[in-house]
Image (tube, grey):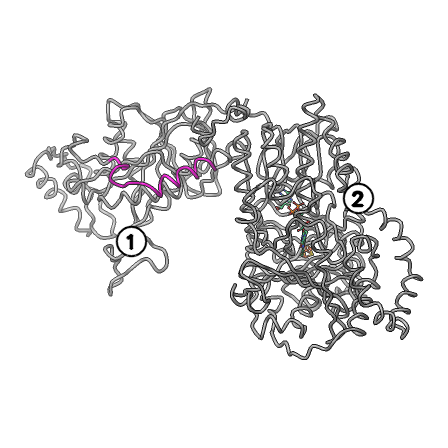
Amino acid sequence: MEYYGGVNDETLRPPTVWYTDRVEINMHMVVLTKGVPDFREGKVSFDEDGHLERGKTPTVMNPNDKIALRAALQTKVKHGGTVSLMSMGPPGYKEILQEGMREVYADDLYLFSDREMGAADTWATAMTVATGIEKLGEEPDIIFAGFKTADGETGHTGPQTNWCLDINENMTDRPLITHVISLDIDEDEGIVRAKRLVEGDVSEIETIEAELPAFVVTDPEFVANYRRAEYRLRYRDLREETQERAANLDLDEDVTVWNHEDLNLDPDFIGLDGSPTIVAGVDPIPKGPSEREAQMITPDDQEGMEAVLEEMQQFVAGD
Amino acid sequence: MTDEYEHYEAVVVGAGPGGAAAAAALAKQGVETLVLERGTEAGSKNVSGGLIYAEKSAPYTIDSLFPDFREEAAERPVGEYYMHNIAGEKVKTFDLNKIHHHDTEWCDAVLRRHMDSWLADQVHELTRETGGGLLTDVRVNGLLREGGQIVGVTCDELDPIRADVIVAADGVNSELARDAGLMDWEDPEEWFQGVKAVVEMDPEVINDRFDVSPEEGVAHLFGGDLFQNVRGGGFLYTNEGSLSIGTVFHLDSLADERAEPHELLDSLLTHPLLDQWFQGEYDEREYAAKLVPDSKKVAHPSPHRGRLLLVGDAAGQMQAQGPIIKGMNHAVTAGGLAAEAYQEAKTRGQPEAAGALYEQKLEDEGVMKQLRPQRYRVTRFVSESPPVNWLGEKVLNSRVGGVGIKAFGGLLERSFNSPFVLGMAPDTKLTYVTAPARIGEVLGTPVTAENDIEPPELDDRIGDLTYNVGDPHIEVLDDSFEASGLAVTACPVSAKGFGGGCYREETVQTNGSTERKVSLDTQPCVECGTCAIVADTHWEHPSGGKGVEYKQG
Ligand SMILES: Cc1cc2nc3c(=O)[nH]c(=O)nc-3n(C[C@H](O)[C@H](O)[C@H](O)COP(=O)(O)OP(=O)(O)OC[C@H]3O[C@@H](n4cnc5c(N)ncnc54)[C@H](O)[C@@H]3O)c2cc1C
Ligand code: SF4
């Protein structure tokens, strides 16, 4: 039994406590993460105009994603299973996956990466990630994402990934639970019971139940709870074992990298080309007049895409 | 199912030497053992002076349970042992090697953070194999009872846990011993207070100034008139790259004399005698303090109740043999015996007899005899009585006494080396202050050196410690100066007129009259336990991982 750290002394009593009490339902969990510039003092670098110098600022795992990873670890500790950590980004993101594994936990690491996927917005990212999840074969019981990334991003990737999964006929629709601050799984009922901040407000907390599989977005206020010694002991085992694994990780061997071909994705739908978001400064984008007739364009080629951009041009001027 | 309480065959509370020994011995016998430690790492709460003895006569020694101990967890082996009798600047040094080596297999200096955390790793490995393990950051806050019987423990951080046997190795101020009604925290006479500084010094410099090889260490003890009449003494032990220097005083004497513990430590640090070692350099790594039980008075003759067995300081098993302090070794022995007792009782089909069997073993193995020597009990009444002391002082201080000391200097040195005499030695000013001072005065030679080092101020000492501040864990029940005023001076991180410590004296105006009160801020508390005894408080340890965190110990 691997759990016991390779002890095979027959004279020892069989492990009893956690083994009898623990309910193994072997959850499969996926945690989504992305890299952000390291905003810590002394790490971050700005140019003369006060713009962030991405090239000179090291990229680290989004701190909020570590909180999501903790929620997944808690679930694994209590109910068994595996935690897959996933990201989309350049090959350098392998180190971010490694960081997540070292500092929190992960059983296996996935990176969706190639040139076609570059400069994707949240929507294109969501599309890619959702396809990656589908490719895992077995549907995860819970997908975890952290709340907003630290580089001022929108917090949309999580929910949008879930929409992408919902529109995928091969995948079960799953409830989306956001601002989760604590989490428990009821194995018998097959439900997740979560405490969440209503509207992200710390003063208002509600408890909700949802059926598995589910999509959970953790709030920065999330705290894992381990009120049984067996959980803490298992936590300690898992942490020790993964830290060692993370330290000896072979980034080429141990990170599964899928490119757009592996995922069977059309380059036009991913990366910059597949990103409908247009950043037009910080002003809000005015709504199009509602009486306007919808114009259907199929953006399945260069021409189509250009038409979309042209159509949108008039709304993004900002005045 | 998951709503039910967890159960482990054995729960050991505390991962000091006593708990580590008990857990290792239990695990080696295949007992499923869970160890709960409140520190963020084992050792982060612990302080000792630092000499751990392996006694030839002891049934368990730390290296019998942990074979790599000396190599991995200890500092220098200590082969030489001296006692300095001090009167002003006059010092007479006795060689106490004989008593130091009496019944000693080996003796090493240790620093507790390193030692205990190393032990905890071994213990975790051993206990994990039986289905248990060691957890830090968990504070046990009481006993779980059912129908009046002790059936487990309750914790701040975990749901209650049941166990067939509970070993309380939670040290001095054991909350479990108190909860079980086996110990009270009333009488300052039953305790010592130890205060210590760990001082940085390069290994080569130590070799040179103490005239030892890299594999050797030395112990120096100090007694006499340098501690403002407070009963007790000082010590200095060499570590690999640091010195442990401290004081141990009878708590009642310390409190009554209204002495400031940090000042007494400074009196030692700045004595001219120490200049030969400091030579003007002083770099303090850590200031620490803790109570020490006096086994002569509080070693519990029957340290168990139901499934609960007390081990080490929790049972008062801390022996002060004159200047020699033996607590860690006895905690180890007791831990081993408690484990053995449980296993035997279980084999006989009567696990509930473990406590009685443990008590028997402490007696049979001669541990109780060491802890509470009969001689002390017999002689105490006479020798601690005021007239006898008065007479003793008179004689010693007289010219005749001086002549006697001169004539019998060698005999005196020999009696300091006698475990028999030391076991009998009364806890009076006579033994701790007058006699050493008189010896120094009559036989000593003046130390001419000038020791101009400047130990840190109290607020810097506090500032240099690491704290993870939690909720207040001590509540003053009676804040009148009469009830709790002693804590203002006796608390090692408070001082009269000092605003940055735990206890402060205040004058409050009420209806025209002024009242003296004390106020408490637990933030700088080092959890030494002093105010649990000398003040009227409700005293608990902080929750797991909270409070002070020692890096040296
Ligand atoms: C200044 C000083 C000098 C000393 N010098 C020496 C010396 O030279 N030689 C010697 O042998 N002895 C010496 N001692 C005494 C020695 O330190 C003790 O006797 C010894 O540490 C006792 O061991 P123990 O295992 O019983 O308790 P401890 O070592 O105190 O261990 C108790 C453990 O229990 C933990 N704990 C406490 N309460 C709880 C709780 N509620 N829940 C969970 N965990 C808890 C603590 O964090 C700690 O780790 C000295 C003591 C002092 C203060
Ligand atoms: S407040 Fe009490 S326990 Fe804390 S350091 Fe002072 S005397 Fe010791």
Q: Secondary structure at mark 2?
A: helix
Image quadrant where one finds the N terminus of chain B: top right
User: Which label is found at residue A58?
Assistant: 1
Q: In the image, is residue A172 above or below residue B10? A: above
Report whether residue A147 is seen: no
Bin the neighbour count of mark 2 within 10 Å (Cα to Cα): few under 14, some 14-19, many 20 and up.
some
Q: What whole-number distance in Å separates the C-alpha atoms at marks 1 and 2?
A: 65 Å
**Which stretch did the figure color magenta?**
A236-256
Q: Is residue A283 magenta?
A: no
Q: In the image, is residue B252 above or below residue B211? A: above
Q: Position of residue B111 (x, y in %)?
A: 58, 54
Give the number of marks.
2
Dominant secondary structure, magenta: helix
User: Is A89 left, or right, of B151 in this rendering?
Assistant: left
Say which of B259 and A177 sits in front. B259
Q: In the image, is residue B53 above or below residue A246? A: below
